[in-house]
Amino acid sequence: MSLLEITDLTVRFAGRTVVDRVSLSVAPGDRLGLIGSSGSGKSLTALAAIGLAPDDAEVSGSVRLDGREILGLPDRELAPLRGARVGVVFQEPQTALDPLMRVGRQVAGPVRRRTGVSRTTAAARAVALLSAVGLPEPEHLARAYPHQLSGGQRQRVGIAVALAGDPALLIADEPTTALDVTVQAEILGLLDRLVAERGTALLFISHDLAVLARVARRIAVLAEGVVREEGEVAQVLREPADPATKSLLAAYRASAWEPQEARQ
Amino acid sequence: MILSARDLERRYPLPRTRLLGPRRYREALRGVSLDIGEGDGGTGIVGESGSGKSTLVRLLLALDRPDGGTLSHRGTPVVKAGRDFRRDVQVVLQDPFASLDPRMRVGDIVAEPLECLDVPGDHRARVRELLAAVGLAPGAVDRHPHQFSGGQRQRIAIARALAPGPRVLVGDEPLSALDVAVRVQVMDLLRGLANELGLSLVLVSHDIGAVARLCRRVVVLHEGRIVECGDTAEVLGAPRDPYTRRLLAAVPRLPAAGPGEE
């Protein structure tokens, strides 16, 4: 059974259809990448699926998590699912974290909500999570505020928060777009390792084909709110069928740097 | 040389850790020398956050003064940038949504440097010519920035930068806010303009692909120093400095997609 089953998801803003009958499914342990240019509806698809679409959006269709319909559920019923079943890593680690709360507490929060352990145990697990995401001196760092960390460190904290409730699905919405390339490489390696170790399913959203290919196994190409092509990453890259995929590949080839080409 | 930077140094004061403790500084730039010549085929300045590239851009544009070293413009040390300097050296910034005044019409935006810098000639004709050069319809003059897409706004910003007929065009991450397909178009536009007008492009970017395509020479900045500098193909093909190697290794790439390869 699918962990997440999205069927005919449609999102409208003021009469304009931004996501148009999107159907996608993510099995346990699966890794699906959503790609598209800006305005293709990729982020909105993922956010609407977990009830995080803006209030003025009209959302219809069906989203099943663990077989249970969750579209249209009130927030008080969705909230326990977020964190515990689905964790989200956002693009901007700066805005995703609470600037007034020490990072240790931000990680400990979902741990407590999920497991109901004592404050002290939760704090210890938070430190273990901060260490698992590769932060140096996690005991010391747990007492820091977000502004005291670098962008890469903040995104590591964001990943720790998303994983704190031990979710079955991790949604990562352009998690490395705001980061330097060397930091991006580290964060992608980290995500790759963590979801493999924990058997977490991954829904990874990106506009960057090469970044997506690094972590996803399957790829879904969105353009103007419609899924234009879906398949195994290697297969789609080898034989792109849809013009939208071809144009993404062409843009990549025309702008990316390939070392082979530089050496010749 | 149009611009010649010698041993530029810039440091910023850090917040005091103790009330009466000594003032401490962060060395943003530590002795950077760089020459930008007439029609030199483009210089890419590559580096990550904290490398000092933004500081270097501000100094090269004379928007900030170095704590050490000098910047010379056509042989004369720059103390305060005057009209001659501003006509000669222009900039395109990263965010086309923030760099254009939303209340101004595109025609006025592009004409502004012509007026500020007292450029002689028919300004309206010059604006039409510039809009055509960046691939925008003449009707754009009467419209406002919000009526344009990100790529089109970047074209407007390029037209404005080219208005006074500069010889050096500094691009501070001019492509990184754009979508991939649009990025390719703006990259092609910059390359075409640089060739056609014999402009010396100074491209500050973390985008190795853009630098490889637009610049004959590359400068790698790390922790305020130039760690490697040379012909772009040579540096990218056979990096000598360990940091350059680390940077290039981190650039995400698609797996080789030939049949039978995995």
Image: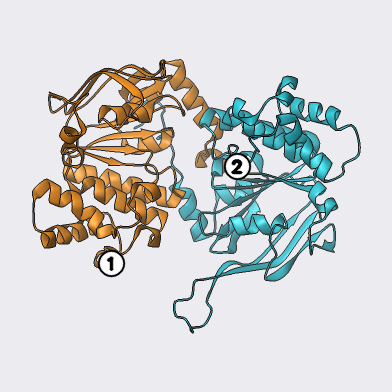
Chain colours: A orange, B cyan
> Alpha carbon of mark 2 to alpha carbon of mark 1: how far?
39 Å
The chain under label 2 reads: B
Task: Give the tally of numbered discs.
Answer: 2
State left or right for residue A239 relative to residue A202.
Answer: right
Residue at x 61%, y 59% (from the top left corner):
B55
Residue at x 64%, y 30% (from the top left corner):
B145
Residue A71 x %, y %: 21, 24
Q: Is residue B165 in view from this perspective?
A: no
| B129 or A212, nearer to the observer | B129
Q: Is residue A55 in view from this perspective?
A: yes
10 Å crowding of disc 1: few (<14), some (14-19), many (20+): few
Residue that carries the numbered disc 2 in the rendered image: B212
In the rendered view of the protein, which quadrant contains the N terminus of chain B? bottom right
The chain under label 1 reads: A
Residue A97 x %, y %: 33, 50
In the rendered view of the protein, which quadrant contains the C terminus of chain B? top left
Type of the residue with mark 1 = Glu
Q: Nearer the viewer, mark 2 or mark 1?
A: 1
Q: Which label is found at residue B219?
A: none
| A241 or B165, nearer to the observer | B165
| Contact? badges 2 and 1 (CB < 8 Å) | no
Residue at x 68%, y 31% (from the top left corner):
B189
| A208 or A99, nearer to the observer | A99
* Residue A56 in the image: above or below residue A102: above
Q: Which label is found at residue A137?
A: 1
Q: Does dot 2 land on a helix, a strand or a loop?
A: helix
Residue B45 x %, y %: 62, 52
10 Å crowding of disc 2: few (<14), some (14-19), many (20+): many
Type of the residue with mark 2 = Ala
Q: Are marks 2 and 1 on the same chain?
A: no
Residue A19 x %, y %: 36, 20
